[in-house]
Image (tube, rainbow, N blue to C red):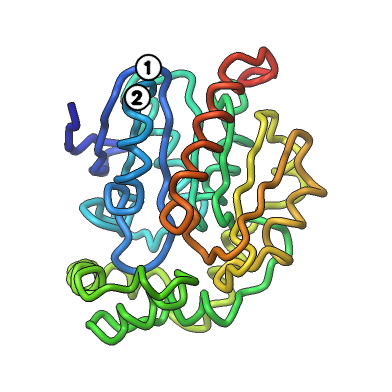
């Protein structure tokens, strides 16, 4: 049964949605304004719940999770909060799936907690050393919290305009308005510094011991394949990349059936391999 609750992590509230039973999978959302854990991963969580315990939090500054006092977010904050959440839930072993910004957090978490993280799936993942801020990511972070801004942002995320429906625009605009104050404090211009904050060092990436699957859209303009996914292949010791043609920044939506098959197969295989957590 799906549960929605608030968990205290280092004295700060974290909103989390949980579903299913079995080995734990932590789902980490991206950085677009109005993004939440449940909103980003609803369909994926539904596909996993029969075999996995799904944990989908809102990062600090997003959805129902406030920024800790004096914080403006950042890779360290989001990584520490994800680790603390899993500790608070009593989960010692788990896979991590992260989209975009969440991909960088997933890799940082795997580097920091090699005995806990069994596998990593980076979807349109950030985190590659030296990856520049793309013009489209800059525009996503700058999107105005209204209907026009929501429509423009969704048009950058999806290759297929059929996903930019009136109801999707209305829902995203409402979420953007609700979180506008916190979001404005996290990604003010100039924004290249926030993109740099979401890159990992070669030392951090070499500390990732869990197997990693990267899933990327060939036409992703927000985190382009050439500057984000491909460089990670040079720095991760156990990594494979699956590129989806005719796909933008959100493979979990634009190619949902294939994405779910890739995800389930990789998680199941990694759970059986002795080379996962603790290597």
Measured in 3D between alpha carbons, the distance from the residue under mark 2 to the one under mark 1, in whole angstroms, is: 5 Å
Q: Where does label 2 land, which residue?
A: 53
Comparing 209 with 66, the one in front is 209
Q: Quadrant of residue 25?
A: top left
Q: Are marks 2 and 1 in contact (CB under 8 Å)?
A: yes
Asked whether, in this view, residue 188 is left or right of residue 8, the answer is right
Which residue shows up at 56% across the image and 29% down it?
A: 265
Disc 1, SS: loop
Asked whether, in this view, residue 276 is left or right of residue 84, the answer is right
Comparing 256 with 60, the one in front is 256
- Residue 95 percent across, percent down from the top left: 50, 29
Comparing 266 with 98, the one in front is 266
Q: Earlier in the sequence, mark 2 or mark 1?
A: 1
Comparing 4 with 241, the one in front is 241
- Residue 16 percent across, percent down from the top left: 26, 39
Q: Where does label 1 land, which residue?
A: 22
Which residue shows up at 19% across the image and 38% down it?
A: 6
Query: Counting other residues with Cα less than 10 Å from the Cα at mark 1, is it few (<14), some (14-19), or many (20 or more)?
Result: few
- Residue 106 percent across, percent down from the top left: 53, 43
């Amino acid at each position: 049964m799906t549960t929605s609750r608030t968990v205290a992590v280092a004295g700060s509230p974290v909103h989390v949605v949980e579903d299913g039973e079995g080995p734990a999978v932590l789902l980490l959302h991206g950085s677009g304004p109005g993004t939440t854990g449940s909103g980003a991963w609803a369909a994926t969580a539904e596909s996993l719940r029969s075999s996995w315990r799904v944990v989908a939090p809102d990062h600090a500054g997003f959805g129902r999770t406030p920024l800790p006092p004096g914080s403006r977010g950042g890779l360290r904050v989001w990584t520490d909060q994800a680790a603390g959440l899993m500790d608070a839930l009593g989960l010692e072993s788990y896979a991590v799936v992260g989209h975009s910004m969440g991909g960088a957090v997933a890799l940082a978490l795997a580097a920091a907690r090699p005995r806990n993280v069994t596998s990593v799936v980076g979807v349109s993942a950030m985190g590659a050393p030296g990856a520049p801020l793309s013009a489209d990511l800059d525009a996503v972070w700058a999107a105005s919290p209204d209907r026009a801004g929501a429509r423009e942002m969704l048009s950058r995320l999806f290759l297929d305009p059929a996903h930019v429906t009136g109801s999707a625009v209305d829902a995203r605009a409402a979420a953007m308005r609700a979180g506008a104050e916190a979001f404005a404090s996290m990604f003010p211009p100039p924004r290249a510094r926030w993109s740099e904050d979401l890159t990992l060092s070669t030392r951090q990436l070499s500390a990732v011991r869990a197997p990693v699957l990267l899933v990327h859209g060939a036409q992703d303009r927000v985190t382009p394949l050439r500057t984000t996914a491909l460089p990670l292949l040079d720095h991760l010791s156990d990594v494979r990349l699956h590129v989806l043609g005719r796909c933008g920044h959100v493979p979990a939506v634009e190619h949902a059936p294939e994405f779910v098959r890739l995800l389930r197969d990789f998680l199941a295989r990694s759970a059986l391999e002795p080379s996962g957590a603790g290597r």
